[in-house]
Every structure is written in structure tokens, then in C-alpha cells.
Image: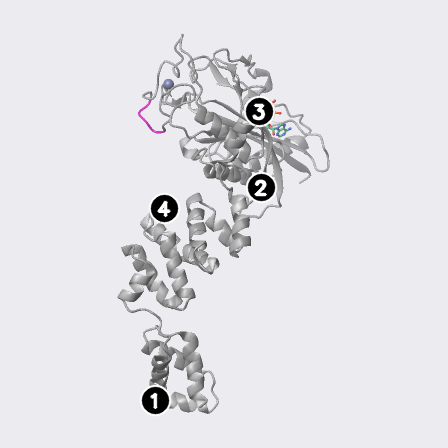
Amino acid sequence: MKYEAVIGLEVHVQVRTASKMFCSCANEFGAEPNTNVCPVCMGYPGVLPVPNQAAIYATVKAGLLTGCTIAKFSKFDRKNYFYPDMPKNYQISQFDLPFCSNGSMKLSGTGFSGAPLTEKVVGITRIHLEEDVAKLTHFHHDSGVDYNRAGVPLMEIVGEPDLRSADEAYAYLTNLKEIMRFGEISDCDMEKGQMRCDVNISLRPVGTEKFGTKIELKNLNSFRAVHRAIDFEIIRQAELLDQGVVLKQETRGWNDDRGESYLMRTKESAHDYRYFPEPDLMPVTFTDAEIEAIRATLPELPEAKRQRFCADYGLTAYDAEVLTADKHLAAYFDAAAKLVKNPKNAANWIISGLLALTGEAGISVTDCPVTPEKLAGLVNAIDSGKISGKIAKDVFPEMFETGKDADTIISEKGLAQVSDSSAISGAVAEVLANNAKQLEEYKAGNAKILQFFVGQVMKLTKGRANPGMVVSELKKQLDA
Ligand code: ADP
Ligand code: ZN
Ligand code: MG
């Protein structure tokens, strides 16, 4: 490939608030169309918008989580256009003074193909807050407009043109979504339209600095579609450039069924939005103390968590990745890890035990009958030699079913490991007495028979004998 792709994303994220941005209608997905509406979000004349403080704070939080500078003075602006999705004929947005600017995000994880990425920091140009517009649905003969979505708080996160491949764009979106979810800013469910993405992409000859003409891609409904569309567009643009075609700035749509982009409009038909300051809203100001107060509410981000889990708890990168995939799961592990001597064992029990059971039962770890304290109890029972790992595999599902703690089940069922030396030496003597043939073979020099004796003692004690003690007792009696 003699071209390098230059990609910058513009991501819209709905803020999860109780009410809309400028009125008290519910911010709720899936309600009967046009039921969450009022004169404000329907654009009736004579009404006044009232800004939603929670949405503004959430936007500042998003900015702080991506290392942005928070503006101490910002304002809302009117973006004028005429289309049925906006009954006021303008959208309240932010033009030259957004809440957040000059941030960055470290790409981590893998691309869509699963290929690991080289570490990279991607610039975030700005994050501004606006109101979402109504949702249009096109039927066979006519179209429907649902104003429930009109006025829902919507952040626009504009990224620098720092991405170079479809995989990097995929990782950028995955990381952004993770941050929004950990920050409880948005659930970013793309199927519910809570996260939407436009892709800007251009090519330039490898080794050159100057950017090529950018094409904007719209209607990308999944991260997978973003990945496919970028790969398609790289090939399409490269072919045109190879033919000597001078590309013109344009907006293209993505048809996921056909796996192709198509022309929507050219630069010449671009809108002039005639932005001007929103006269019905006061500018928004923040003091340093107010910004610091919001900073104090920030959660630890997954990347920082992964590093801490590896450094403090001795987890592998893989364990840390699995355990930070979900905020609640990470909190569950963190709580259990603090209560055990060996956090790595707690991680193993969660990854290969707990997740299978919660997955099967279709419940979240927060609703799991085995609390972090109870899981820690099980891990400690194994680590202290009270039960073997093998017995623990029977205890664990029972804990999950009954909600009882490990110690209760161990004593109710008499599962505690036998570490009483007289009981073990008795069992060893019995096994040796009952297996004269194997004893002879051992004496004749077949050392492998030792494992057979261990197995027999474990069988006799129903798996409860302390394996270390069994081995040393066997050696003692055999070599006597
Ligand atoms: P516009 O003036 O069209 O809004 P901006 O410069 O504000 O363009 O950039 C919008 C988005 O396009 C940003 O995400 C940015 O990273 C990206 N972008 C800008 N120039 C290019 C380019 N030449 N190639 C690819 N993406 C670009
Ligand atoms: Zn309303
Ligand atoms: Mg711009």
C-alpha cells in the first residue's frame, strides 16, 4: 500500500440523565412515540429553555476523564437549519466555546481483528454539549417523526485526525465507550442510538505530511460497520488516486448490507448554519474549586485499574483485561482480592468459576449469591489447606445455589481436609496393606507406583486427605 490513511472520528454520545437537556421531559428510550414531549422540546413559540445541570456536569466529567481542559467560561449557540427532526428550526449546540478541549486518550486493547495495537495516544479536539434531534423513520409511503429523542442531552466528541487504520478506529471507539460507561456518563448502547459515530478519512502518500481531501462517512451503526467502512473507503480512495482523480470533499453514507459507501452530498451543498449565541441562555461559568469538586468524583478508569491489578495483585495482563471488562466485575474482584492472601487465586475462581455460573444463570455479579466476602472465604479455605482445590470445585456451585458461605458447607458436609497425622498414617498403612502387589513393584524399584498409592489414599479419604502430608507419610512408611 503506497498510501497512509488519516482518520478522525466525530462521536455523539447521549448523556444518561433523568430528564432532557432543556425541559423536564423524561430522557427515556423505547417509550411510545411522541409521549415524552412538551412545548419546549416541540419548539412552541414563547417558551424558554432551562439547562440540565446534571448533563453539563457529566460532560465536564467526560472531559476530565479524557484529559481535557475545562472552560471556565462557555456558552450555548444556535445552529440554524430547517428539517423535520428539529421543530424549532435550530438546534442548541456549542460553537466556539465548548465545555472541554485539548484532551487525549491512550489506545489500549486490540483492533476488531484481535490484532494487538502499538501503544498510541490520540488527541481529543473538543467535547461539546447539544440537544439531540427527533428520530425519523421512513416507511413505505411516508415517514414518522418521534420527538421523544428531541432535546435529549447529546455530547459531541471530536477526535484529532490521529488514527491510521480501521483497527485503531475500532480501539478508539471501544476505549471511549469504556470510559463513558465507567464514568456512568452514558451506557453507549449503539442499538439504542446512545452512541453514534461519523468517520472522516483521507489518504496521503506514505512518508508525506500534508493531509489529503477528507471524506465524511455517516450512518455507521456499529463498531463493526465503522471498521468495514474504513477498510472499504481506503481501497475506494486509493483506486481513485491511482487513476489520478482529484478527490473533492464529500459526505458519504454507508450501506452495511451491500458493504459499500455511497455519495450523500458534496461540499458545495454544505449548510451554512449561521451560528450565533443562544440568546435565551446565560453563559456557563466554572470556578477552579467547582472543577476540582467534579474531578473528585471521577472513577478509576479501566486502564489504570488493569495496571493496578497487575502490580498490586500479581494478575496477568489477560486476567486484568477480563476482570476490567465490566465495572461491577472489577469492583467485585477488588473487594474479594482485599480479603485474601493470594489475589491471583481469587481471580482464577472468578474467571473460571464465577463467570460461568453467573453467565448460565443470566445474572450480574452484583446479584450473585456468592458475595466477594464469600468468594474470599472459599479462596482462604483452599489456601489455608482446610479443603483441597478439588473439593472446592464441589463447594463452589453449592455456595452459588444456596448462598451459604464456604465454611458452613464444609462443616455441614464434613469436607474439611484431613490434616490429622494419625488419621493419615492410618489410611496410608491400610492402603499399603491392601496392595501387596504394588508394594512389591515399588520395592523392586518402580518409583511411579507412589502416585498410585497417593490416589488410593485420596480415594479412601474421599479426597479429603492433605495431599502433601499423604506423600510424606507414604515415603516414611515405604522407606521404613
Ligand atoms: P470540519 O471543518 O469539516 O468540521 P474539522 O477540521 O473540524 O473539519 O474536523 C472534523 C473531523 O475530521 C475531526 O474529527 C478531524 O479529526 C477530522 N479530519 C480533519 N481533517 C481530516 C483529514 N484531512 N483527513 C481525515 N480526517 C480529518
Ligand atoms: Zn420537553
Ligand atoms: Mg469542525
Looking at the picture, the colour scheme in use is: one colour
Q: Earlier in the sequence, mark 1 or mark 3?
A: 3
Q: Earlier in the sequence, mark 2 or mark 1?
A: 2
The CA distance from mark 2 to mark 1 is 65 Å
The amino acid marked with disc number 2 is: Leu
What is the quadrant of the N terminus in the image? top right
Which residues fall within the magenta stretch?
Answer: 29-33
Residue 305, given in percent of the width and then of the height, sits at 51, 46
Dot 4 crowding, Cα within 10 Å, few <14, some 14–19, many 20+: some
From the viewer's side, name the closer residue of 205 and 362: 362
The amino acid marked with disc number 3 is: Ala
Residue at mark 4: 366
Q: Secondary structure at mark 4?
A: helix
Q: Which mark is residue 433?
A: 1
Residue at mark 3: 71
Q: Is residue 31 magenta?
A: yes
Residue at mark 2: 107
- Mark 3 and ligand 3: say if the CB distance to the nearest ligand atom is below 8 Å: no
In this rendering, position of residue 159 left or right of residue 26: right
Q: Earlier in the sequence, mark 4 or mark 2?
A: 2
Residues at discs 3 and 2 in contact (Cβ within 8 Å):
no
Q: Earlier in the sequence, mark 4 or mark 3?
A: 3
Report the mark closest to the observer, 1 or 4: 4
Which of the 4 quarters of the picture holds residue 73? top right
